[in-house]
Image (tube, rainbow, N blue to C red):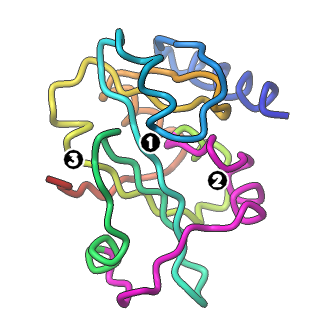
């Protein structure tokens, strides 16, 4: 399934004339496992968290620079969520909403959020940090796909998603 979704994503990016840089690597479940394969990239890798508010239907995709430490209570405060009420989504919600399994979620998964249930919180540094490319999983955790920051914004616009920018320093 992920190969078909990846092809659909790549075709969508191609239809927008977005050039990408792809790094194939063994399947990885964590940023720590991924980074040795991305040491040579001309850009920055991302860490992605798919979160929900306890007992509510609010969903967030938080996309930050790979080396950021995220405290869920502090993040919840930024999102207006009471302390302790921000949780990782379960795999069923992840599959239903973004069509990916755990370990594969990325900003590129928003292509499949047709109902626009997911709110995107993006690390301001990804767009404003003078990075040549931003690398994220292309529906599979066995590759990382780089897009220029301006092209990431074009992708979001084409999928009718907007990003709330936040500093994570």
The magenta region covers 79-107
In three-dimensional space, the C-alpha distance between marks 3 and 1, rounded to whole angstroms, equals 17 Å
Question: Element at badge 2?
Answer: loop
In three-dimensional space, the C-alpha distance between marks 3 and 2, rounded to whole angstroms, equals 22 Å
- x 56%, y 68%: residue: 88
Residue mark closest to the camera, 3 vs 1: 3
**Residue 161 drawn at (x, y percent):** 47, 51
- x 52%, y 13%: residue: 23
- x 15%, y 25%: residue: 130
**Residue 155 drawn at (x, y percent):** 47, 34
Residue 124: numbered disc: 3
Residue that carries the numbered disc 1 in the rendered image: 157
Asked which quadrant contains residue 7, the reply is top right
Residue mark closest to the camera, 3 vs 2: 3
User: 110 left or right of 4?
Assistant: left
Whether residue 99 is in magenta: the answer is: yes
């Amino acid at each position: 399934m992920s190969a078909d979704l990846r092809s659909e994503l790549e075709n969508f990016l191609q239809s927008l004339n977005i050039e990408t840089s792809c790094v194939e690597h063994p399947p990885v479940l964590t940023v720590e496992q991924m980074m040795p394969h991305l040491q040579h990239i001309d850009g920055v890798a991302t860490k992605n968290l798919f979160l929900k508010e306890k007992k509510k239907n609010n969903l967030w995709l938080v996309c930050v620079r790979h080396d950021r430490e995220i405290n869920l209570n502090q993040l919840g405060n930024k999102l207006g969520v009471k302390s302790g009420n921000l949780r990782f989504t379960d795999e069923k919600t992840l599959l239903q909403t973004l069509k990916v399994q755990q370990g594969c979620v990325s900003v590129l998964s928003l292509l499949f959020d047709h109902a626009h249930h997911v709110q995107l919180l993006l690390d301001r540094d990804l767009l404003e940090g003078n990075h040549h490319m931003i690398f994220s999983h292309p529906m599979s955790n066995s590759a990382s796909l780089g897009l220029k920051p301006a092209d990431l914004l074009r992708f979001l616009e084409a999928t009718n998603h907007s990003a709330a920018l936040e500093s994570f320093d």
